[in-house]
Amino acid sequence: MKQQIKCYDTQACIRCFACMINCSVENRVRLQREGVMNVEQSVQATMPHFNYLTPIRKEIGVYPNARQVTAFHHCNHCENAPCQGICPTGAITTRSGGEVVINAKACIGCQSCGDACPFDVPVYSKENGKAYKCTGCYDRVENGLKQSCVEACPTLAMFSGNAENVIEEAKKRAALYTEKTGKKYIVYGADKLNDYVGHLKWITIVEETELEAYKLDTKPERTLMQWRDTAKVAGAVMTVAVALGTTAHFIYWLDKRKKKIAEKGNSHEN
Amino acid sequence: MKTKTVLAYSSLDMWFHKHMIHFVAFLTLSGLPILSEKFHFIAYGIGHSINFLAGDMNSEGILASGISFLRVIHWLSAFTFTAIMIPFVISMTQKVLTLSIWPDKWGASAVFEGIGEMKKNYIDLEHAEFGKMNTGQKASAWLLTVCMVVIVISGYILIFRSAITHDIISIARGAHAISFIVLAVTLLIHIYFATHPANQAAYKAMFKTGEMDEEYVKEHHSLWYRKLQKL
Ligand code: HEM
Ligand code: SF4
């Protein structure tokens, strides 16, 4: 399967939140399909750990120029997914289409993924002791359907497809908005943000000065977790160095001691 | 005739040191597979046995079972280790000023002098002027203590994570792992010197008698010997 990317266009969004609702519906339907819950149960249970797509609404600017913006908090399906790197049970994998997915069967709820995620995405369910986050609807996508959020969007503010096509379309839209408004629009996440996360597979078309309002972090970091990665390499190197150094010293010491004893013997004889 | 001896380690020191080895071994063995997939074989070995006994041969669950089990071991060892640490820490704080962790002489030149003495002992195999601990031992005692304090504090932050913000938890996670790595490498060096045949007397004192022959101390820890004589 070719790399899939989702894109959220802040300009085309009408804040209807159909994406969020369809995401919730899809997660409930999945439970019904898998025989985990019946329809009534799955509709009534709140199951907050299934809120993969959380809109955060706020007003920016001062009246009369104030307006609403909606930041979406969700998994970005990072190229170098730090959650996948840290998960001790191998529960997190990247599908061939690029979706970073937690396998609930292998998840032990240690919350390491949350320690590593610079976007604070995986949520821990106290109910069943497992971590949850957006799966990129990989089951739908691998069967030729669109992600449920994308499918629901009435204005194509949420769109998806093969990486090249989506990035091309996103850049086209950003250029158009820049031309029409005179403000610079960019495609957040299309290019590598840093080594820790790489590029994102959920990108956003946004006006450059509004990155913060949309809670789009251009330097997603977890400094000590990054040092931890470096320390692991340094630790391996140091362990080898200590092993070699001590062995060499021991051989040297045995030899030197022999010589010393021989020297002493000689001086006694004289 | 019984040779005169010097008390090197109290019975509490010896008791704590012995059990610390057990707990650090447990904590390391249970922590390593969480830290790095290079050590997943430990978790696979355990997980395989658990799943075999449970009749669940689903291969997805092997690593998960092993890691779950090791986490329980890690947490239990951590609690027990903390409990036995309490009397040791109290005794250490009471006599902290008389411990041999403080430099015999201060200043940068004293450090080089100390390193020079270590070279005399371990490279030239000549007589060196040591206190109870040489400069390297003092440095490693400090390093190990700092690492241990960081490991324990960060470990408890990780255990009580539900009450703490994400930023702090991730700092604790990094600090726990980094201080473990520094500790582990320092311990390898510590173990080499501790089990080195040249240091048999100290090994015997720590694990068996708590005492060292006075003649040995006079020869190998001359500064300490002089200090003891003055007392
Ligand atoms: C005594 C207090 C300690 C506590 C409360 C503690 C607790 C923890 C916790 C909660 C974790 C996270 C994994 C999990 O949730 O199970 C962890 C990881 C770990 N611990 Fe400890 N621990 C302690 C001491 C030690 C010691 C003494 C060592 C080794 C000498 C050690 C080595 C490790 C390692 C290597 C990891 C994996 C770290 C990583 O993957 O980032 N711990 N510990
Ligand atoms: S909580 Fe689950 S998915 Fe997250 S790191 Fe732990 S085992 Fe892996």
Image (cartoon, coloured by chain):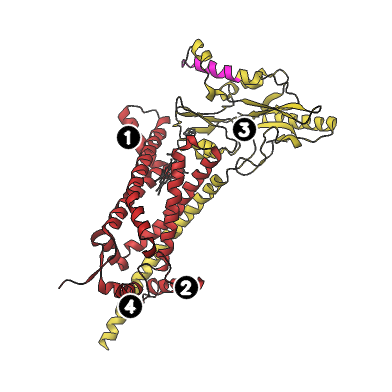
Kindly report the distance in space between the C-alpha atoms of the residues bearing marks 1 and 3: 37 Å
Q: Can you tell which of label 1 and label 3 is closer to the viewer? A: 3
In this picture, residue A243 sits left or right of residue A5: left
User: Which quarter of the picture shows residue A182?
Assistant: top right
Q: Is residue A25 above or below residue B222?
A: above
User: Disc 2 is attached to a residue of which chain?
Assistant: B
Closer to viewer: mark 2 or mark 1? 2
On the image, the x and y values in percent for residue B215 come to 26, 74
Report the magenta residues as a range: A23-36
Q: Nearer the observer, disc 3 or disc 2? A: 2
Q: In this figure, which residue is indicated by the disc labeled 1?
A: B49
What percent of the width, then of the height, locates residue B74? 38, 41
Q: CA distance from mark 3 to mark 4?
A: 67 Å
Q: Secondary structure at mark 1?
A: helix
The residues tagged by marks 4 and 2 sit, at their Cα atoms, a distance apart of: 28 Å
Neighbour class for label 4 at 10 Å: few (<14), some, many (≥20)? Answer: some
